[in-house]
Image: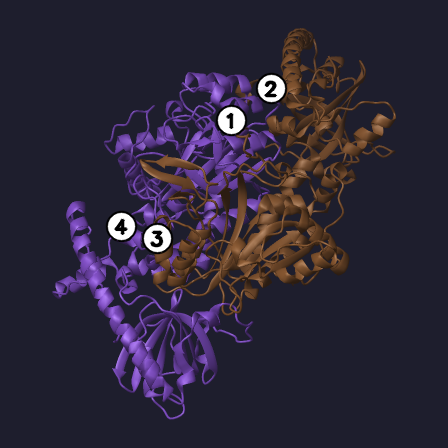
Chain colours: A purple, B brown
Amino acid sequence: MSSPPPSNATAENTNEPAELSKKAAKKEAAKQEKLKKKQEAAAAAAAAALAEASIADPLADNYGDIPLIELQSKAVTELKWTEVKSLSSDLKDQEVLVRGRVQAVRAVSKKMAFVVVREGLFTVQCVLMVAKEKVSEQMVKFANALSRESIVDIEGVISVPGEPIKGTSQQVEIQVRKIYCINRAISTLPINIEDAARSDAEIEEALKDGKQLVRVNQDTRLNYRVLDLRTPANQAIFHLSSEVEHEFRVFLRSEHFRGIHTPKTMGGTSEGGAAVFRFDYKGQPACLAQSPQLHKQMSISGDFRRVFEVGPVFRAEDSFTHRHLCEFTGLDVEMEIKAHYSEVMDIVDRLFVAIFDHLNENCQGELEAISRQYPFQPLKYLRKTLQLTFPEGIQMLKEAGIEVDPLGDLNTETERKLGELVRDKYDTEFYILHRYPSAIRPFYTMPCYDNASYSNSFDVFIRGEEIISGAQRIHDHEFLTKRAEACGIDVKTIATYLDSFKYGTPPHGGFGVGLERVVMLFCNLNNIRKTSQFPRDPQRLAP
Amino acid sequence: MSSPPPSNATAENTNEPAELSKKAAKKEAAKQEKLKKKQEAAAAAAAAALAEASIADPLADNYGDIPLIELQSKAVTELKWTEVKSLSSDLKDQEVLVRGRVQAVRAVSKKMAFVVVREGLFTVQCVLMVAKEKVSEQMVKFANALSRESIVDIEGVISVPGEPIKGTSQQVEIQVRKIYCINRAISTLPINIEDAARSDAEIEEALKDGKQLVRVNQDTRLNYRVLDLRTPANQAIFHLSSEVEHEFRVFLRSEHFRGIHTPKTMGGTSEGGAAVFRFDYKGQPACLAQSPQLHKQMSISGDFRRVFEVGPVFRAEDSFTHRHLCEFTGLDVEMEIKAHYSEVMDIVDRLFVAIFDHLNENCQGELEAISRQYPFQPLKYLRKTLQLTFPEGIQMLKEAGIEVDPLGDLNTETERKLGELVRDKYDTEFYILHRYPSAIRPFYTMPCYDNASYSNSFDVFIRGEEIISGAQRIHDHEFLTKRAEACGIDVKTIATYLDSFKYGTPPHGGFGVGLERVVMLFCNLNNIRKTSQFPRDPQRLAP
């Protein structure tokens, strides 16, 4: 048995109606199950034959499946593994040991085989060629029988071929001396990494030549997320995601912000409204926090001065869009302000320029890996972030022939349109729109001193989509209570929050960002499920 | 009106029965409400009188309450505020502007007053002395009427007194020229910071002199947490907490770990067991994650190789102890292992030595602030963390006359006893105990290769209390499923987790730590509620 057949079971058309696709999937699943059993029986027989054959092989110790007991921490090791990404011509003729996954096996003959081993974003070609006292025919046979995605240890000598190696990241080969299987993947995977890593462009290109390549749809990917996460684009996306958070922390610490953790379980209904998950907390009615808003403000009242929090945020909304999740990672900031909410916008400006710079300067390999599957243009942003007032935005739209309620909200379409107008006029895809109408902001938003119909608040946009909301908050107890009541909030449910403003609170403001949206829009991806490791939406609660 | 009277309403004895205390509190509350109204009326009258008086004062612009409208971002400011902690004799004769809280007001005469201003851990004495064209009698009167904890802006000139200043951190004074109130605290606070900051030793010392000082009990503190958080010890505790997390991240990044975020909402029952919060997720039965265990392991299967996560962890346990919370901050790690679970223990060893070193080297001021209220001895730890096997621990207990089931768990008491024995023998209060009995570890724990009654697992202790649990995990699908079934888990509920081991998974292991426990035990605090900003226990869901 050589490498497994392509799993056409997953060749789903993304536009296929859900019902049909379910039935087809069920039928296909039964078929696959049968096929799988057949293959497993064949694999077992092959393994048995192999085991018998290897007895007669003097090189039998140099390959084979490592029994589980050997992997139960039998001994501390002195061995050193080299990372695939470090394999270069500098190591020519040296012995190396690598651990990785079998990405592909190519059987050339009984005497020769290639195994491509992958570790993260990096791949290397490993060559088995029968040679006396080095590589036996049985060893080549063992390598050929490895299922894709199995974990292997490979020991060998680095060689540098005369010509460039196509299809692997590393431009050296390993001349294999030993090859052990650490953990075997089932032979028929629900999705193949190769299929999951394919760009739409490649599929369309092949179609022109009359070739139908497998396209793995979003739902199938998420059902088998651990496989899907192994694609180069996904490896890169989650690297980027962790770097966004890292730079967020580095920048804010340098500006004397302190990381906090506030509770996600709360009494009452969080900030009010219907979109909360409710549950019973030891006999008390409780809900999951829609944001750390109330507690981060209480931290300011508690003299923490400048705080940030990175944590889950829960929204029980029925929003089935490309940009909404029921649980996402919130990046939240709250700070004392001395005189003006522009102090908060100044932090947003410098923070995000620092994040974008960091990604562009330190994640080139990852950005390219994403681009190969999901092509995108680098984000346009200015050294000093553009700030427009909401009325200025409305005016720009008006001049472009789009009438918008000056005291109402922008919808997704007008936001996108305004993004285009701003890009064309100011050459930036990242800007701040401030002085929003009071009516569409939460009760705790400070109105403008000169016109209570507007507020000291702002939204921030990337490529025409909102990623950040922020504002100066009302720090006066009496005024805050009045505003809460006016907005129809049951003030009893947020009594501890309101009371905290009785004990002296400095003027303050802050903002909240969705981590998944930042990564999605920086890379111009089309769905937020691509930037959440295990997404949760109104229907998806697994894996 | 000078500074408010001490609020004896909160002078609760911690041993007082809850019932009595409730009744007393109710009565006291009514009394306080009456007092408050009286005081408020007096304050209003005083303010009115003051307003009238100030009309006649040519210096009237140099003091007063700033109206809210001025604080609604009326103008961007060019003013520079100096932090209280930066005030030193280097600034002698210079003009400064500070914003802080009124910690105390001392009226010396009609012509002189002292206002102590606090910003975080730091305090400075501000002097108002009547002087022509500088300070008027009305201005002194205004200062005297400021309620404690109000936010003020103070402008003045730095002077250096000949003698040390008692009771403030900064050894300079501000000769006040202008003083404005930004936000006024109510005049009768539910707890005074002075009371909340008092050590037990001070209370006992005073008692010897027949003086009864106010002791604020834990529940009252938590009810008015935003006030309680302002004490020096609490300012320091949460600074420490953020530094533990920071160093956790710095160290792990340097070891090529990547930060991830996994969902807190899950189908099924998390890792099984009763201690989960259940809720309805859009018609699907769901629960809050007891830990990121399943998803961090799936991240390893998804080729993330080395991951960490900092996030909330939910336990619906009815544990009313000094060391349990229903929601806490988990510091979680998972990593591929090459050969032995000692690779995981090695990370624990170096990570925690790095964290402890970081705190000792960079947080001396904070450690002293905590120590002043809650005295403690510095943690004893070795450069290379001591590792003992569980059987060795059992043997030490046996030699000390304590018989323990060699295949059972240690209880809190035997853990503490073993901690003492270890400290006496090895001079460390931080050590790893490994090779725990399999029967008391979760189903996914890898048994020892040589004896399945023991497992490749460990706990880590600080001052005799467990803070970390870790282990090698079972990476083999068939074996893992068998173990889950043997442990009575409904495997259907964790199907996506189990399935993820079919697609090739490297040997791996990891551990989980409670952030609140690390800080609590590093500082030898007596209650985990002291290290959680807004704690959640079986009864407490607010603030």
Which residue occupies the foreground of this view, B144 or B369?
A: B369
**SS of the residue under disc 1:** loop
Question: The residue under label 4 is which amino acid type?
Answer: Asp
Question: The residue under label 2 is which amino acid type?
Answer: Ile
Closer to us: mark 4 or mark 1? Answer: 4
**SS of the residue under disc 3:** helix
Question: The residue under label 1 is which amino acid type?
Answer: Ser
Which residue occupies the extreme left position in the image? A210
- Identify the mark nearer the N-term, 3 or 1: 1
Locate residue B132, reporting x and y percent: 78, 17
Q: Looking at the picture, does residue B87 appear above or below residue B219?
A: below
**SS of the residue under disc 4:** helix
Q: Quadrant of residue A403?
A: top left
Is A137 placed left or right of A96 in the picture?
left
Question: The residue under label 3 is which amino acid type?
Answer: Thr
Residue where numbered disc 1 is placed: B73
Closer to us: mark 3 or mark 4? Answer: 3
Where does the N terminus of chain A fall, quadrant-wise?
A: bottom left
Closer to us: mark 4 or mark 2? Answer: 4
Residue where numbered disc 2 is placed: B66
Which residue shows up at 27% across the image and 76% down it? A45
Residues at marks 3 and 4, CA–CA distance in whole angstroms:
14 Å
Which residue occupies the foreground of this view, B294 or B190?
A: B294
